Amino acid sequence: MKATDKQVGGSHYKDMPIQPVQYIHANGLSFLEGNVVKYITRHKSKNGRADVEKALHYCQLILELVYGEAPEPVVITVPEPPKRKRGRPPGSKNKPRRKSAK
């Protein structure tokens, strides 16, 4: 059995038409470039956002170590969920409280 026919620790690469290792090797990519390919290729099937952040980190390392640029940090913002209206919680069967007259 060829090493490219098996995968240790999951199947997130093995089931792909072109495995990242094959693409990386065929194109002579560096360690840093290969990690960008690896993490961006698997993010949907393995670690989601964390893998995208790792790919961005390797892109920043390339800018810094290869091009001598100190990259500006990449900020990923996630919108906050909508604020709940005051009053009874959804699905509550309790009657709303009345304000007492003073």
Image (cartoon, rainbow, N blue to C red):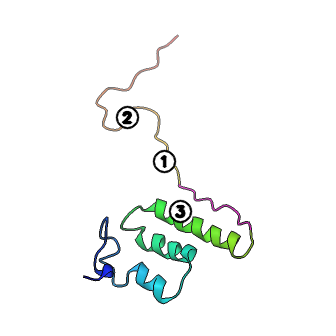
Q: The magenta stretch spans which residues?
A: 70-78
Q: Which residue is mark 1?
A: 82
Query: Where residue 36 sits: x, y (%)?
Result: 52, 73
Is label 1 in a helix, a strand or a loop?
A: loop
From the viewer's perspective, tell me whether residue 43 is left or right of residue 4.
right
Query: Which numbered mark, 2 or 3, is in the foreground of this view?
Result: 3
N-term-proximal mark, 3 vs 1: 3
From the viewer's perspective, tell me whether residue 21 is left or right of residue 36.
left
Circles 3 and 1: CB distance less than 8 Å? no
Q: Is the N terminus in the top left, top right, bottom left or bottom right quadrant?
A: bottom left
Residue lying at 53% horizontally and 64% vertically, measured from the top left: 54
Main secondary structure type of the part rendered in magenta: loop
Instruction: Name the image quarter holding residue 33.
Output: bottom right
Residue 68, labelled with which disc?
A: none
Residue lying at 50% horizontally and 65% vertically, measured from the top left: 52
N-term-proximal mark, 2 vs 3: 3
Residue lying at 58% horizontally and 59% vertically, measured from the top left: 76
Label 3 and label 1: CA atoms lie apart by 25 Å
Instruction: Name the image quarter holding residue 57.
Output: bottom right
Q: Which residue is mark 3?
A: 53
Residue lying at 53% horizontally and 86% vertically, measured from the top left: 28
Residue found at the very far left of the displayed protein: 1
